[in-house]
Amino acid sequence: MELLKERIRREGVVVSNDVLKLDAVLNHQVDPQLIMEMGKEFARRYREERVTKVVTIESSGIPIAFATAYELGVPMVFARRKKTLTTDSDSYCERIPSFTKGIVTDIMIPKSFLTEQDRVLVIDDIIANGDAARGIIRIIAKSGADIAGFGVAVEKDFQKGARTIRELGVRLDSLVKILRLEPGNIVMED
């Protein structure tokens, strides 16, 4: 997706050979037009897959998942990272490490929001090591729902995450694939 590549080139910040800061593109600041274009692209790729729900993890995947769900005309569900006073106690829960935060958190989805009748498309902003992705896949498996696929805006190809998801037999589509990070340079697949 050329529009996203251009924004990453212009506004992405290489923090290290493993970390790319995309706060101005996907995380803290969100461009609604760019997000809606990403949603249209994921919807185009999965329109024939009979998706009944789009699922993501709090918080950076929410805008893209919302745009995708809107384009597909289905509900969006996000896995919460923190329990609140209103958190449903009857929830699917998985413990996952966070690559960027350097902590372990729980993610949870109420059982009433995912059932064995659902066919789920998972959408997220970035896949690096894939811990969060594998956690959400385990939650979906517990629910009995089918996974139509996994869409990510940015795949860090030099880390194992996307590869491990594909090895599980899950279709994974990325809008941009980053081959490597160098000081001041983001190398993307053409």
Image: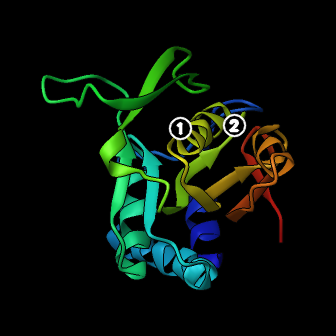
SS type, badge 1: helix
Residue 78 % position (x, y): 37, 47
Which residue is depicted at the point 56% across and 74% down?
42
Q: Which mark is residue 59?
A: none
Residue 9 % position (x, y): 64, 60
Badge 2, how many Cα within 10 Å: few under 14, some, many 20+?
A: many
Q: Choose between 83 and 32: the one closer to the eye.
A: 83
Colour approach in the figure: rainbow
Which residue is depicted at the point 72% across and 44% down?
184
The amino acid type found where label 1 is placed reads Ile
- Residue 12 seen from this side: no
Residue 111 % position (x, y): 36, 40
Q: Which mark is residue 130?
A: 2
Q: Which mark is residue 139?
A: 1
39 with respect to 90 (left or right): right
Residue 75 % position (x, y): 33, 66
Badge 1, how many Cα within 10 Å: few under 14, some, many 20+?
A: many
SS type, badge 2: loop
For marks 1 and 2, give the one nearer the viewer: 1
In primary-sequence order, the first of circles 1 and 2 is 2
133 with respect to 177 (left or right): left
Q: Choose between 51 and 176: the one closer to the eye.
A: 51
Q: Is residue 42 above or below residue 59?
A: below
